[in-house]
Image: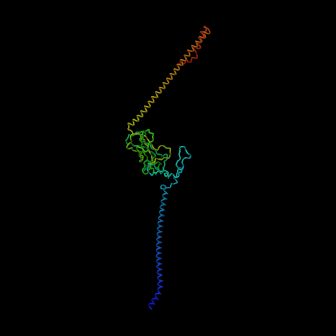
Amino acid sequence: MKVASTLSSLFFLLPLLSQVSAQGNQNNRNGGNNNQNGQNNNQNGGNNNQNGGNNNQNGGNNNQNGGNNNQGNQGNNNPQTSLTLDPAVIAPGFANNGQDPPVAGQVASLTSTNNFINFCLTVNLPITDGKQIQSGSCNPAPIGAIPSIDNMPSGKFEFPPNGGTVPPNQQFTIRMNIRNLVTGNFVNAQANYFAAPQQLNGAGQIIGHSHVVVEQLQALDQTTPTNPREFRFFKGLNAAAQGGALTADVTDGLPAGAYRLCSINAASNHQPVIVPVAQHGSLDDCVYFTAAAAGAANNGQNNGANNGQNNGANNGANNGQNGANQGQNGANQGQNGANQGQNGANNGQNGANQGQNNGQNNGQNNGQNNGQGRNNNQGRGGNGGFGRGGFNRPRRLARETL
């Protein structure tokens, strides 16, 4: 009975236990799902965090872009750092080739509508870039500020004077007077050569400096061009003028010979000075001088003077002789005239003789023909008509006058 009672209880409890077990499993599954949901939530949270990070990164990028925009805007606001050509500085005249109308002997200009800002792209040369490139280069720096005609610079050498003499191989000092150039402004010639435009000071004068160069010549009267690569002395004058004059010491002097000394007035970056008009006096100066001992120099001057005197004396003597010859020729002409006069007188005498002879002959003939008694009359008449002959009287007067 106990066994049967126990089995009956089991049959009754099994369905209940099955339901409980199923509910437990369901709860476990639900819990697992909840865990998965929690994981999903965690993943979603992670994704949200990542999205937040991305958003932060995007915000950083936006900030960087803002920084870039600010830098770009700031650069554009400064025309001296901007890479864009400001329309206000475009020269419209650069687009005109100058041939309207054409002029004989005049060529067309190169033209541009953007101030030639990319001109150096058209030539196969390196950019100058502040360097002294001996093989040639292209310089993109503009010419710069140009002074008025009243501020054009000019220089004149004081020593050596033109035609002067200095002792050979002895130190001497070049001295040049200068005006309208703000001297003493000399940039690094190895790093800033032609690297900036010409500039003016507040008074409108070119800011710059000068140079002096001495070239040796074959003779003072040399007419063949010199070679610019060859010179005896060169110096950039980077000190300011004192009392309106620049100086340069030629420490070792110069060997005996003939020389040319010239100036090269320049802006700060060593480019030759630029002025506003094409027609102007020379902005630089040149003189010719000799390096020679004092005696040699004097001998040269004396020889020149003596040659001049000798030439003058010889020319004067020759002229005198020529005058004497002309006088002699005149005398000869006078003598010839006298001879002609004498010949004329002789002709007169001959004419008189002919008159006398003709008169006498005619008288005699007439006397013989008309009779002896009338012969005397005819003779006298013949003498009166022809013997004294009135046609020959002017010749006789000419002879008497002589």
Q: Considering only vertical position in the picture, is 346 above or below 184?
A: above
Provide residue 203's location: percent of width, then percent of height.
47, 49
The image quadrant of residue 244 is: top left
- Up the image or down, 77 lies above or below 332; here it is below
The quarter of the picture where residue 362 lies is top right
Task: Give the percent coordinates (x, y) of residue 59.
Answer: 48, 65
Q: Observer-nearest residue: 117 or 249?
A: 117
If the image is split into quadrants, where does the N terminus sit? bottom left
Instruction: From the viewer's perspective, tell me whether residue 388 is left or right of residue 159.
Output: right
**Looking at the image, is 47 positioned above or below residue 319?**
below
Colour pattern of the rendering: rainbow
Of all residues, the one furthest to the bottom in this rendering is 1
Q: Nearer the viewer, residue 161 or 310?
A: 310
Nearer-the-camera pick, 44 or 198: 44
Q: Residue 214, position in %: x, y? A: 42, 43
Q: Count numbered badges in the picture.
A: 0
User: Residue 392: percent from the left, percent from the top?
Assistant: 57, 17
Query: Residue pushed farthest right?
Result: 370
Task: Pick out the residue farthest to the top.
Answer: 373
Question: Is 213 on the left-hand or right-hand side of 109?
Answer: left
State whether residue 373 is above or below residue 207.
above
